[in-house]
Amino acid sequence: MGKTIAEKIFETHLVDEPFGDVSVLRLDRVFCHEITTPTAIEDLVARGKDRVFDPDKIKVVIDHVSPAKDSKTALQGKILRDWARRHNIQDFFDIGRNGVCHALFPEKGFVRPGFTIIMGDSHTCTHGAFGAFAAGVGTTDLEVGILKGVCAFKPPQTYRIDIIGTLRKGVFAKDIILKLIQELTVNGATNRVIEFRGKIVDEMGMDQRMTLCNMAVEAGATCGICLPDRTTVDYLWEFIKDEYSDKEEALKAFSEFGSDADATYADTKTIDVSDLEPLATYGYKPDNVKPVSEMKGTRIDQVYIGSCTNGRLEDLRIAAKVLEGHTINPHVRGIVSPATPKIYSQAMEEGILKIFMDAGFCVTNPTCGACLGMSNGVLAAGEVAASTTNRNFNGRMGKGGMVHLMSPATAAASAITGEISNSRLFAENQGAGK
Amino acid sequence: MKKFEGNILFLDRSDINTDEIIPARYLTEIEKTALKPHLLEDLKLDGFDPKKDIESASMIVTRANFGCGSSREHAPWALEVNGIHAVIAVSFARIFRQNMFNCGMPAIELPEDEINAIFDTFSKDQTRMTVDIEKHEIMLQSKHQTRTTHFRISDFDRALIQTGGWVEYADWHY
C-alpha cells in the first residue's frame, strides 16, 4: 500500500510508539525564538538539565520584539543569547542579522525535504512548503526537543487538497488559503496534515507555497505540506550543491519522500480557483471570509505589510507594483516590515523600498512585532487594520482593535483608498473592479 | 490515583483562542505567576467577568475547538496559576491539548450531546466536578442535580498525567 509524504517522514524518524498511541519522532531541527524558549531554558536550568541534544540542529533567532522595547523583552533576548553562547549554538541570529523566523530559516537553507522540525510557534507549519513535517509546539515540547531531540505526535492523517484551475491576475496564494480556511472552518483540519497538491501549487514559487502552508494551522492543521519538486531544488540549490552532482540527482533524492500514487488519505478535496476573487476576513476568526468587492466602504486606520505569511520579497514586489506612482490616503498609517535582512536589502536594490517610502509607508526592520500586537504598530481600541498577517482574533494587533486579513496587493490598494479595496492588478484585467 | 476536582467555570462559546486566554502583550513575562491577573482578559462573552468568575473555579467546561491559534503554553500556565487544572470540551486545538497533558493537566473531550446536556443542566448553578483519570469518570454535582459521565483518554495521555508531564516522561524514557 502506498504512503503519503507525512507517513514516509514519520516512518524514517520513528523512535518509539508508546502504548501504540503516538509516534515519538527524531528531530532534524529545533527552531527557537525569544518568546517561547526562555521559559524552557529556565526550566531546564532549574531541573539541573541545562543541556542541548545537538547544537548544530538548533537554530535560534530573536524576532518577535526586535529591538527590545523594554526591560522584560531585553531580558528574554538576553536569556536566549546567553544560552546560545554557552551551548555553542552557531546559528543564532541577533539584531542586524535577524528576521521573522519562518522567513529567515528557509532562506538560510535550514529546511530540507523529509525533515522533521518543531518550534514553539504555531506557524512552524510554514516549512512544510519544502516537503518537511514541521509543527508548532508548546514550550514543554520545545524543552524536550532541545534536551532529547524528540517529539511525540499522533500518527499523521492526511487531508489532500488539490488546487486546480487558472488563477486570475491579481489573485494570490493568500486569497486561496483564505478561501480554503473559509471552506474547512477553523477546526476542519485539526490533527491532520494538509497536503497541498494540483497544478496551481506546482506553478507557485516557494514564497507563495510558504504563504499557503503558513496558514494551514488556521484550519487547525498540524502541518501544511507541498511535495518537493524542481522549484524546491532550485530554491535550495546554493545550500545543497555540494551534496548532489546535479539538480536532477537532488530532485530524485527528494522525490523519494513524495506521496505514492496509491497513498491513502483521510480526506480529499478539490478546489477550482478559476473564479476566485481577492478575499479578506471580516470578523474575529480567520474563517470569516468574504470577497473584497463586498467590503467596499470599510474604513481603515493602518495598513501592515509583513509577517511570516506575507513579508517575503515576492509579497513586497506585488505591493510595490500596486503602490507605484501613488501616495497612501492621508488618514492611513502604512507600515511595511520586510521579513529578513536579505529581503530588506533586495527590496532596497530593486527600488521597492523607495516606492513604499514615496507612497508614505514607514519601513521597519524585520520583526514579528505588529502581527501579534507586541510592538512596531500596535492598534488603539476602535482602530481598524488592513493586514497581510495570519490572525484576526479579537485584540490580536492591540486591545480593542480590528484586523482584516488580506493579500499584499489588496493591503496596498486599501492603503491608497483608505478603505478595503481591490487592487488595480485585479481590476485592470477583469473589468471586475466593481 | 489522579483526581481533579473543584468548581466549574462555564465558557459558552466555541473557538476560544489562546490570544483570548492570555493576550500576547503578557508573553514578555518569564515568571508564570505574573500571568495570573490576565487570564481570559480579552474574552468577550455575555455575562462573563474575569475579575469575578475565575477566582472560585478550578475546572473549565466549554464548547468546540478550545485553545485554537497561537502555540503559547502561557495559556495552560495562566489556567494553572489560577488553580484551574482541567478543561472539558467538545474538542481542542491540537497544540493546546498537547500543552495541557505536557503540563500534567487533563484536556478531556466529551461528545457534543453530553456537553450540551451538561450546559443545560448545570451552567446556571454553582457546580462541582470531579475528574477521575483512573476510572475515566466525570462526576458533576449542583444543589439540585448530579450526573456521571465517562470519557476516553489514551494510555499515553494518562501516563503523562501520572508522571507529571512530558519532561518527566521523556527524561525517563529517552
Image (tube, coloured by chain):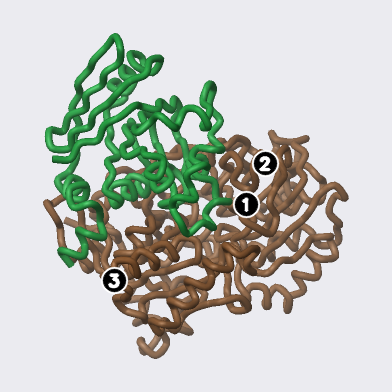
Q: Is residue A293 left or right of residue A199?
A: right
| Alpha carbons under labels 1 and 2: distance apart | 10 Å
Asked which quadrant contains residue A139, the reply is: bottom left
Asked which quadrant contains residue B136, the reply is: top left
The residue that appears at 31% across and 43% down in the rendered structure is: A267
The residue that appears at 52% across and 73% down in the rendered structure is: A78
| Alpha carbons under labels 3 and 2: distance apart | 43 Å
Other residues around mark 1 within 10 Å, as few (<14) / some (14–19) / many (≥20): many
Q: Amino acid at mark 2?
A: Gly
Examine the rendered structure and indicate whether residue A250 appears above or below residue B71: below
| Residue behind mark 3 | A48
Work out whether disc 3 and disc 1 sit on a shared chain: yes
**Residue A116 in sight from this viewpoint:** no
**Circles 3, 2 touching at the beta carbon (< 8 Å):** no
Helix, strand or loop at disc 3? loop
Q: Is residue A178 left or right of residue A267?
A: right
Examine the rendered structure and indicate whether residue A151 appears above or below residue A331: below
Examine the rendered structure and indicate whether residue B63 appears above or below residue A215: above
Please provide percent x and percent y for residue A135.
37, 58
First reached walking from the N terminus: tag 3 or tag 2:
3
Pointer 1 chain: A
| Residue behind mark 2 | A401
User: Can you tell which chain is drawn green?
Assistant: B
Q: Nearer the viewer, mark 3 or mark 2?
A: 3
The residue that appears at 38% across and 73% down in the rendered structure is: A112
First reached walking from the N terminus: tag 3 or tag 1:
3
| Residue behind mark 1 | A373
| Alpha carbons under labels 3 and 1: distance apart | 35 Å
